[in-house]
Image (cartoon, rainbow, N blue to C red):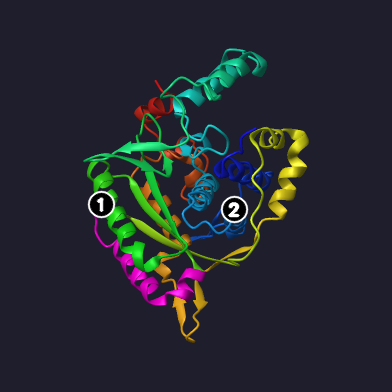
Amino acid sequence: MAKASQADLAWVQFDRVIADAIAGGHSNPWNGDEYVPDLAVLETLLGIARGVVGKETTAGVLAKALDAWLAYELRRAGFDPEAVWPRASTPRIVPRAITSLFEAFEAHNGKSAAEIAPVRARLYGSSAPSGLVSANASVLGKMYTKQVDVLLTDALTGPELLISTKRMDGSIGNNAANRIEESYGDAKNLRGRHPLTALGFVFGLGAPAVREKPGPAIKLLDLLGKLSNEQDAYDAVALILLDYDIDAPSLDVPDELDLAARTSDSGADAVAAQIARAPKVTVHTSIRLPNGGSFEVPDALHADVALKTLIEHVLRVTPVAFHTEARIRRHLMYELGEDVGQTGDDQELLDGS
């Protein structure tokens, strides 16, 4: 039996962590005007990713942890869970129209879950028809198609929020400038076709690499700060500074059969045990350097500031009849009612008519 992929192992554990976090419903991230991100979940996801990849600094699993967390935060903010990608279960990318169809069958046509299950299994399985579901999402920009890591999108509205994630755990001096250059071009490309879309960039940076090469890290900090200085680039940029023990043991990657067993109800304890063995990762906004100085993440690059900016951008540029739950959580409105001033056209859009 072949080994499962690192990404497959990580996602099984990511899903468990997030499911536990929302067991009683999504918590409201807003405290007045302050957005309070769930950093405990982020640290757990990053710890899982570190455990899965070990000392590999090129593995994309670390960036997937950021993707999973950002999608979780957008759901906490009140956006439609099925319109936020990656989804909280496989497949990660499913057009909202498809999930709406299943919901309509269940709610209005008297179809039971058992009747719909074969169709859902066919569509969501490994042999799904090409082009309907996916593990990754791509968005057409002004010049080229770009894979985007975290999205809020719908067939009616098109992309409303796009976030690209990058991470770096070593070789800052050699690769940082290239990463920023790529990201700057991607922002111009996406902004050129989607001028109203909230556009964000989140960069995960390993604190051990900063302590080793503080000079290049400070240059990277300066470049990240400049990415949101232009109106046709990013609306918000965040730096996630993650600290961990570089010598922590890695987690074993099981074979595919064992991994499949862990996704069943009887395998839940195995997943929980794997999560408990994950290395500890801590998110900082400042760290001490070996020379006695400090590396400080500016307020403008904090995750809470970036998330607040992106979420409020979406709410600001859409009619009040859209994203009702997000507006309620942000305390911008009460439940939809006669006092909202909703137009007939808005209601028709919401009803899909």
* Most frequent secondary structure within the magenta stretch: helix
The quadrant the N terminus occupies is top right
Near-viewer residue (237 or 64): 64
Measure the C-alpha gap from mark 1 to mark 2: 29 Å
Callout 2 crowding tier (Cα within 10 Å): few <14, some 14–19, many ≥20: many
> Residue 181: percent from the left, percent from the top?
28, 57
Callout 1 crowding tier (Cα within 10 Å): few <14, some 14–19, many ≥20: few
Amino acid at the residue labelled 1: Gly
Residue 178 is left or right of residue 307, and the answer is left
Q: Is 181 above or below relative to 80? A: below
> Residue 273: percent from the left, percent from the top?
75, 49
Q: Quadrant of residue 139?
A: top left
> Residue 40: percent from the left, percent from the top?
62, 59
Amino acid at the residue labelled 2: Leu
Residue 208 is left or right of residue 353, and the answer is right
Near-viewer residue (267 or 226): 267
Q: Identify the residue at image location x=43%, y=22%.
A: 130
Task: Give the farthest residue toward the bottom.
Answer: 292
The answer to whether marks 1 and 2 mark residues whose Cβ atoms lie closer than 8 Å is no
Give the residue number, with chain letter if any, for mark 1: 185
Dot 2: what SS? helix
| Sequence order check, earlier mark of 1 and 2 | 2
Task: Give the farthest residue toward the front.
Answer: 1
Q: Quadrant of residue 29?
A: bottom right
Dot 1: what SS? helix
Residue interval drawn in magenta: 208-231
Q: Identify the residue at image location x=58%, y=42%.
A: 11
Give the residue number, with chain letter if any, for mark 2: 45
